[in-house]
Amino acid sequence: MINCIQCIEYVMVLVMILAAIFAVEWKDLLAAVVGMAAVSLVASILFFFLQAPDVAMTEATIGAAMSAAVFIFAIKRTQRYETEEEEKLGWWIRW
Amino acid sequence: MNIGVYYFGAISLMLIGLYAILVKKNLLKILVGLSIMETGVNLLLISIGYIAGRSAPILSEGIGPNQAVDPIPQALVLTAIVIGVATTALALTVAINLYETYKTLNIEELRRLRG
Amino acid sequence: MSQYASLLIALPLISAFFVPIIKAIGKKVVMPFLVLITAIQMGMATWVFNEVYTTGKPIIIMAGGFRPPVGINLYIGHFAALFVLIIAVASFFMAIFSMKAITVEPKDKYAMLSLLLMLGATGMISTGDIFNLFVFMEITAISAYALTAYNKSGEASEAAMKYIVLGGIGSSFFLVGIALIYGSLGTLNMAQIAQLAGQMNPTVAQAALAMLVFGLGVEAELFPLNAWAPDAYQAAPHPVTAMFSAFVVKAGLYALARILYLTHAVGSWGHILRLLIILGTLTVVIGEFSALRQTNVKRMFAYSSISQVGFIAVGFALGTQAGVSASIFHMVNHAIVKALMFMAVGYVALELGGVTLEDFKGLGKVMPLTAFAITVGAISIIGIPLFNVFWSKIQLILAAMKAGKSGVIALILGASLVEAVYYIRLIHLMWFEEGSRERTRIKENFVFGTIMLLLVALIIIIGVAPNMTWNIVQKASADIYNVAQYIKNVPLLPGVSP
Amino acid sequence: MVMKRALAILTLLIIGYWMASALANVPFGADKMLVAQYYLNHVKAQTGAVNAVTAVVVNYRGFDTLGEVTVLFIASTGVAALLWRKKRERTAETEGSIVLTTGARLLFAFIVLFGAYIFIHGHLTPGGGFPGGATIATAFLMLYLAFSAYEIPHRSFEVTEGLAGMGYVAVGLIGLAIGSYFLFDWIWQTWGWGHSNIGRLFSAGFIPVIYTIIGIKVGTELSGIVDSMVKEGGE
């Protein structure tokens, strides 16, 4: 028997995972950052469910708002789109 | 193996972030992955501190010491969030400097340019 | 009275915060201020060292006046006292070196960051709480990221980027390890973790320890996570490179050893030792062979430094007190030698503008004192008798013999052979070959020459009469190995236990 | 490349399975408190705070918080050091729309006040120095977005930041002098101020003092980071 609070939890976790996947896969970096902020926001709601209001507030202001703002400034000073090329394993693994 | 939905969410976020770090080539994308991974770790810590049926550790409004969840992981996560944002800001600064030198954020290109 | 040792943390912190105000007064004062603060820190560290080694009791600092499992405590035992002193001395020398070696603006930010790097390493070595260890590790790491990228060249930025990404992965892993330990024991205090470690579920313990080892592997430069190190060593400002090699990596190794031995009661401890021995061996092998084909001398020293770190990790992974003692002895010797060598290389780079092998041809005629210092360091690190590293390598071999690990002996001997090849090549280049360009003799800086000669003297003193240092080192290793004594030393609050 | 991507996913799945099998032994929702139970039992008497998280952050684990403040300080210093150029100025050309500019003027004071409220009441309600400081930084961020020529007075912000940090350490050192422990809560434990009004504003020893310091520091630091990121270097 699944009660309603539990459905909300399942839906929230699902939304969070989907947002994370989109944030990683979108080629438009601005959209990716918005996805990342969405992950943080949903996570902060989950923190509320887990009885951690302090953490939820901090995550919403610092984790979502400030870090997204800093990311957007960085995108403004660099480039907005990921260039399309074949993908290889990260370069710091190789010497 | 019975793990709750919160543990599942936290582990998934960490794996998605790690995937981005390992596979993606755009530096900003890698940093997005790092940030997602940190969120996952924070969620994991908070859900370890949760105790079923108890409320937030604010001891007014008739909540006694035996009716509150664990405050320590929450204090730890406060620290971890701030540390995460500090790392992100510094990393983005380094990325801006890299872009101004090489005019690209693609790590393969960076390797080639440096020779 | 002993609570005043908390000034070791408070002083660098408050002076780092004071730098913006100093800058408003006058920009010229910033670098002398850095030297002054590190000198005071050195004085305090000497006092603490003296206090700990004469009374034989560790100094326990309780922040906020709460007894340990409730509040955070600092534990300055024999090991921490020794290494806090080494950190302070190295920082003092490098602060003097920085006055000349740092030319890129903004210098006031450099002063703040290097003070905080010193603070982070000091805190990592002296803390007695596992999450506090994480916080100090992040302080060290983030100031190290910023200092690596300080020169703002493309190479420096790329090295810092590698470091940040690997460090980010490492710190996440470390935090997961902490979460698992906290979830199964309900405490974060190191002494209490050691007390309760036997109750941990072996699966959880194995996962948690592996996570912690990987998380610390970034700072401790163990194999899969040390790809940042050569780049960062090469691109960072010269005093910063010396500080990295002299104490940042040591702090990481210490944390590794401390956590490893605290949890020796858990069921799956043997697996973790085996993991660490494999990682250490790979670190040595890859470091040595990469060093062999470098043409940039600073990078070559960086690889050599990495392989020494591998020795130290292998020594800790032997799981015996002899192994721990040998490793700590090697840490001390390596700190001295590498501080000397990176400082000398940095000085050469400052005077000649480059550090490729080509620049080092005929260095003996251009900068004889510096060339002499590098020669002594190189001879020492190969492991020639009457120099300090010889004794720690011998101790490592003896410890491996006692533990019955013949593979480790072969590893150390083989690696020493490879080291001999590239260091003797360098020495030959410096003294017996003519440079292509005609260069006149450079008048070497008196202060830097004095520092280098001091370090050379230290190398030879330890090499000729190792017994005094060896005694100190053995006390320090008992501090790490003897966990029962560690638990007894920390005044745990009696009410808080299951 | 599909091959490498599959390999990465496989590795990640192995790590995930391994972590999940460890976590299965740390059951979700169970009572695992040891030290935390002590905190919950004694928090009101020992620190005077109603919000246990705040007490843990500022009193019991004050060292961590000092470190955390330091980390943020390093980040803002590092960002300023790495983006340092001879001459730097803002390059935004378009002024914000009339709605944004008017709104920013109106809201600025309210947001700053709200941030101050959050950090002053940290020992009573959720929140504290970090979210409060971030809220204040958001107000400055809004000014940056609304006005193309706006700049924070960064010289004085830098000095404020340093002074706030020194203030934190100084509070700790006063504790060392009065109560002989670094970061000792002298206002609550030695002077015994506010014991009679737990749950109201003037209680909880030095928690409001430290949270005010942290709030100011975090606010100036985050605004400083924004300032460094917005301005581009000229030649």
Image (cartoon, coloured by chain):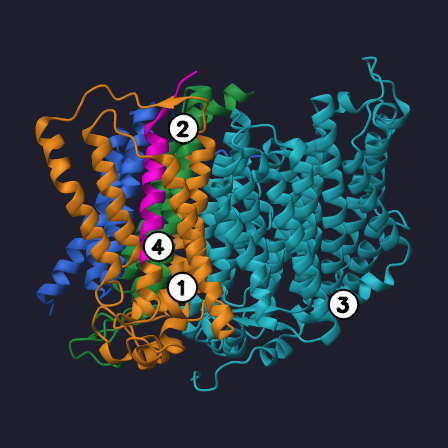
Task: Estimate the spatial distance between the alpha carbons at disc 2 and disc 4, rounded to whole Å.
Answer: 29 Å
Task: Estimate the spatial distance between the alpha carbons at disc 3 and disc 2, rounded to whole Å.
Answer: 48 Å
| Mark closer to the observer (2, 1) | 2
- Give SS at disc 4: helix
Q: Which residue extends farthest front?
A: C25
Residue type at mark 2 is: Ile
Q: Which chain gets the green colouring? A: B
Residue topped by disc 1: C179
- Give SS at disc 2: helix
Vertically, is D160 above or below C124?
above
Q: Which residues are magenta?
A: D212-235
Q: Which chain gets the blue colouring? A: A
Q: Which mark is residue B96?
A: 2
**Does mark 2 fall on the same chain as mark 3?**
no
Q: Colour of chain C?
A: cyan
Residue topped by disc 4: D214
- Residue at 53% x, 58% y is C10
| Mark closer to the observer (4, 3) | 4
Residue type at mark 3 is: Gln
Vertically, is C87 above or below A20?
below
Q: Is residue B2 left or right of residue C393?
A: left
